Image (tube, helix red, strand yellow):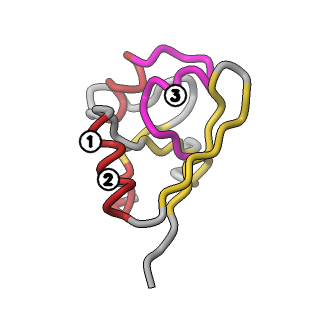
């Protein structure tokens, strides 16, 4: 049985929920839209939320998407008082 994937985020102040019936459709959405899921962590590395892209995260949290990108790429330790990682790297934390 395939797993169902969900992404929840705020877009322009409205809570949105994206549903994907399987991992392949979820990955295709991300690839087609040039997006990588980013994970928001507190300063101790505890999970807070996930967003379909750095752009979505920036809108939801109110920080620069460039700063989030710098954080997920390891050029900055934090952005907006949070740690940020790509979902594919989250297992390391």
Instruction: Measure the alpha-carbon separation of dots 1 and 3.
Output: 16 Å
Instruction: Measure the alpha-carbon separation of dots 3 and 2.
Output: 17 Å
Numbered badge on residue 13: none
- Of the 4 image quadrants, the one containing the N terminus is bottom left
Numbered badge on residue 31: 1
Instruction: Measure the alpha-carbon separation of dots 1 and 2.
Output: 6 Å
Residue 71 % position (x, y): 36, 30
Query: Pointer 2: what residue?
Result: 27
- Of the 4 image quadrants, the one containing the C terminus is bottom left
Residue 79 % position (x, y): 48, 25
Instruction: Determine whether the residue tagged by mark 2 lies in a helix, strand or loop.
Output: helix
Q: Nearer the viewer, residue 61 or 76?
A: 61
Tell me which numbered mark, 1 or 3, is placed earlier along the sequence.
Answer: 1
Residue at image point 58% right, 43% down: 42
Task: Provide the residue span drawn in magenta.
Answer: 50-65
From the viewer's perspective, tell me whether residue 78 is left or right of residue 46: left
Query: Pointer 3: what residue?
Result: 56
Disc 2: CA contacts within 10 A as few (<14), some (14-19) or many (>=20): some
Disc 3: CA contacts within 10 A as few (<14), some (14-19) or many (>=20): many
Q: Does the magenta segment cover residue 69?
A: no
């Amino acid at each position: 049985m395939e797993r169902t994937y969900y992404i929840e985020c705020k877009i322009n102040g409205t809570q949105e929920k994206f549903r994907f019936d399987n991992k392949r459709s979820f990955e295709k959405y991300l690839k087609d839209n040039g997006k990588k899921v980013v994970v928001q962590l507190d300063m101790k590395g505890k999970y807070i939320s996930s967003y379909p892209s750095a752009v979505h995260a920036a809108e939801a949290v109110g920080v620069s998407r460039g700063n989030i990108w710098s954080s997920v790429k390891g050029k900055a330790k934090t952005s907006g008082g949070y740690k940020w990682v790509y979902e594919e790297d989250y297992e390391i934390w």
